Amino acid sequence: MRARIASGAGPWRTRRAWENGAARGAGLTDVPLRPLKLLWRRTIDKTQLVKVRLPVRRLPREFEGMVACQLSDFHVDRDEDLERLEKAVDAVNRQKPELVFLTGDYFSRPEAMRRYLEPVGTLLRRLEPQLAWFAVAGNHDHWCCFDPISERLRRSGGAVLVNEHRRVHRRAAALVVVGIDDLWSRRAEPARAFRGVRRTDCTVVLAHNPDTALYLRHLSPGVMLSGHTHGGVVRLPFYGSVFNSFLRLGRRFQAGLNRYSDFYIYTNRGLGTFAVRIRINCRPEVSRFTLERFDPIQQAATLEEAVLADR
């Protein structure tokens, strides 16, 4: 049984200690506002395990049914963010994945990065994929300084992909994990990341910003995993996010599985919050993927047959 991080053993505290201390500091202990505060904490802390059948173009049969997990946008800026990450790591390990993917924005600010870098690294060392885990940078990571973050991720056992790729083998087949650097930081180089990748290869692309898809369609990706949007933060039924989409791809790519051209993009809602510390109908997310084969030509033919049959 893995030991949990002990209270007082690092720069964070237990949930109860944090809540009591924060409440006293804000004058909220034993007053009517405290239940509201606890309700607010539940809206940003109650992480959802989202199970997805992930369509991957050119997926080798040897990889069909493989389980992989994704975490994104930790934004570890406070003690409670670290606690949320700890629970997410435990949730990932319970899925017994073969691969784990991290898609950026581990911290929001340089001072938070300096304070929480070691504790985050300690938690990520607890990831237990059967094969490997991979990470790419987000815009906040470059604004914080990505060099120490990258070094700590590697020491924790991860493969950090900066406009490069790695091959994962399963029996006689291979899956290519392609990591593209952050788009907003103007460090994304898809052509460099795909250098040496054959068009017949099956690729899983990690890119923090979903808009990266606009610059790699011609490279024939198998599937792309992203974060960045926090799922739209506040989502209304039948409408979606109340915030105007800053994505060039459009509002629907703010969360979940969506098809773009002839491949799919999955946008994880992230674990943390930034600036506006609120979530409505947009819970923090741990993504659990079951990989399945996707043939866009065959799918189009099947749809056409279905339309003709209805006539």
Image (cartoon, grey):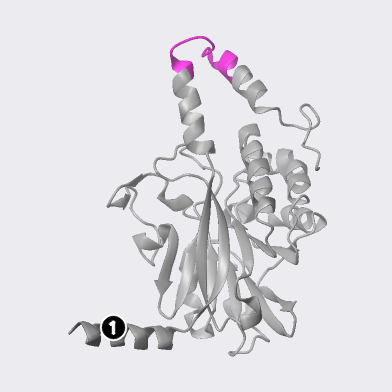
Q: Residue furthest front?
A: 309
Residue that mark 1 sits on: 306
Image vertical order of residue 176 relative to residue 1, above or below: below
Residue 193 x %, y %: 64, 77
Q: Does the magenta stretch include residue 33?
A: yes
Q: 205 and 105: which one is in front?
A: 205
Q: Quadrant of the C terminus?
A: bottom left
Q: 182 and 124: which one is in front?
A: 124
* Image-based side of 130 in relation to 53, left or right: right
Residue 280 x %, y %: 40, 40
Image vertical order of residue 22 relative to residue 310, above or below: above
Q: Does the magenta stretch include residue 160?
A: no
Residue type at the position of mark 1: Ala
Q: In which quarter of the image is the N terminus?
A: top right
The residue range painted magenta reads 22-34
Image vertical order of residue 40 relative to residue 292, above or below: above
Which residue appears at 51% of the width and 30% of the height? Answer: 41
Instruction: Specify the quadrant of the image occupied by residue 101.
Output: bottom right
Residue 23 x %, y %: 56, 17
